[in-house]
Image (spheres, rainbow, N blue to C red):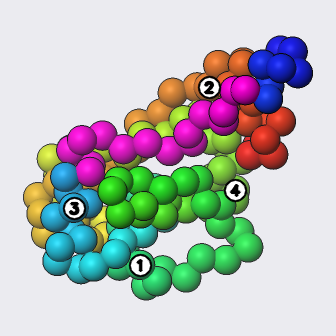
Amino acid sequence: MGIVAMLTQTSPLQVLSTPAADALMHKLQAQHGPLMFHQSGGCCDGSSPMCFPLGEFLTGDQDVLLGTLGDEATEFYISRPQFEYWKHTQLTLDVVPGRGGMFSLENPEGVRFLIRSRVFTDGEIEVLRNAGRI
């Protein structure tokens, strides 16, 4: 990729949300106020994206802010070890029927948040590397 193309191309988003996820976030925000997400990659509940009231999950040096979602700019974090596995993929937050994580706000709604992913193209990876995002 030439220098001119690199200067005019913006970095691809590392996390997106579906309309269903946006609608559920809006509903949860009306009930709980501003939200945040964390994806740890741990076992059990930790393998699902967890939704919390903003500030109720403390992030630290081992967490990476992937981006923001929805109209309210809801922050989406991922643990650094999980980020190392997924840094070459674009994550999409979606909603499916089922039971959410025990501590995740969608738990009583009869649905759960779910991550879908796609591998970035070689060009997108180059742009992300040049931007210092991966």
Residue range corresponding to the magenta coloring: 8-22
CB contact under 8 Å: marks 3 and 2: no
Position of residue 118 measured from the top left corner of the image (x, y, whole percent):
51, 27
The residue identified by callout 2 is 120
Q: Residue at x 21, y 68 (%)?
A: 28
Instruction: Give the residue type that dot 4 points to.
Output: Pro
Q: Report how far apart the C-alphas of labels 2 and 4 lie in the structure.
A: 19 Å
- Sooner in the amino-acid sequence: mark 3 or mark 4: 3
Mark 1: which amino acid? Leu
Residue behind mark 3: 26
Asked if the stretch drawn in magenta spans residue 25, the answer is: no
For the residues labelled 3 and 1, say whether their Cβ atoms are less than 8 Å apart: no
Which amino acid, mark 3? Answer: His
Q: Which residue is mark 4?
A: 81
Contact between marks 1 and 4 (CB within 8 A): the answer is no
CA gap between label 2 and label 1 equals 29 Å
Mark 3 neighbour class, 10 Å CA radius: few under 14, some 14 to 19, many 20 or more: some
Mark positioned earlier in the residue sequence (2 or 1):
1
Q: Does 9 appear in magenta?
A: yes
Q: Residue at x 26, y 51 (%)?
A: 22
- When asked about the image quadrant of residue 52, the answer is bottom left
